[in-house]
Image (cartoon, rainbow, N blue to C red):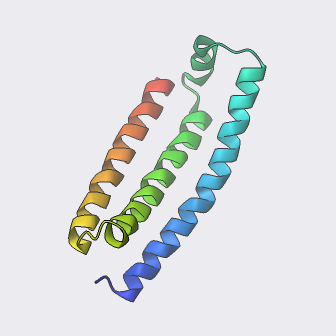
Amino acid sequence: MTSAATQAKLWYWQRLSAMVLAVCIVIHLAMIVYASRGGLTAAQILARTRGNAPFAAFYSVFVVACAVHVPIGLKAIAIEWLRWREWNASIAAVIIALALLGMGLRAVYAVIV
């Protein structure tokens, strides 16, 4: 069983990442509406993102927030609903976090370069 201090830290990080995600989602959806109402094509959107540092920074923050938030929740689900052992759920959560981080940052890089 995880200590109360560890549980409190996980709770804190999941709530903090949720706040960051809420802001990122609103901005992301606003950009989608702007691009689609403006009639931008995929090629035009990619042309605007090439070499755009603020775009890269924003989506990197978005990816990191996802990589923090999702594994914590999945770990809790695995323990509570699937009856996984804490150790197995923790290992799976770390693997998922690294996968999300790696794939997400790779996607950001691909769109920026």
Residue at 28%, 71% (x, y): give it. Answer: 83
Residue at 31%, 65% (x, y): give it. Answer: 82
State the residue lying farthest toward the bottom: 4
Residue 6 in the image: state x and y as whole percent. 38, 80
Q: Nearer the viewer, residue 54 or 5?
A: 5
Residue 22 in the image: state x and y as whole percent. 65, 54
Work out whether 61 lies above or below 56.
below
- Relative to 79, 7 lies left or right: right
- Relative to 107, 17 lies left or right: right
Q: Nearer the viewer, residue 109 or 101?
A: 101
Residue 37 in the image: state x and y as whole percent. 78, 21
Residue 7 falls in which quadrant of the image?
A: bottom left
Residue 93 in the image: state x and y as whole percent. 32, 60
- Relative to 94, 4 lies left or right: right
- Relative to 15, 104 lies left or right: left
Quadrant of image for the N terminus: bottom left
Work out whether 85 lies above or below 6.
above
Residue at 39%, 69% (x, y): give it. Answer: 76
Work out whether 101 lies above or below 79.
above
Residue 15 falls in which quadrant of the image?
A: bottom right
Q: Nearer the viewer, residue 57 or 6?
A: 6
Residue at 50%, 26% (x, y): give it. Answer: 112
How many numbered discs sit on the rendered protein?
0
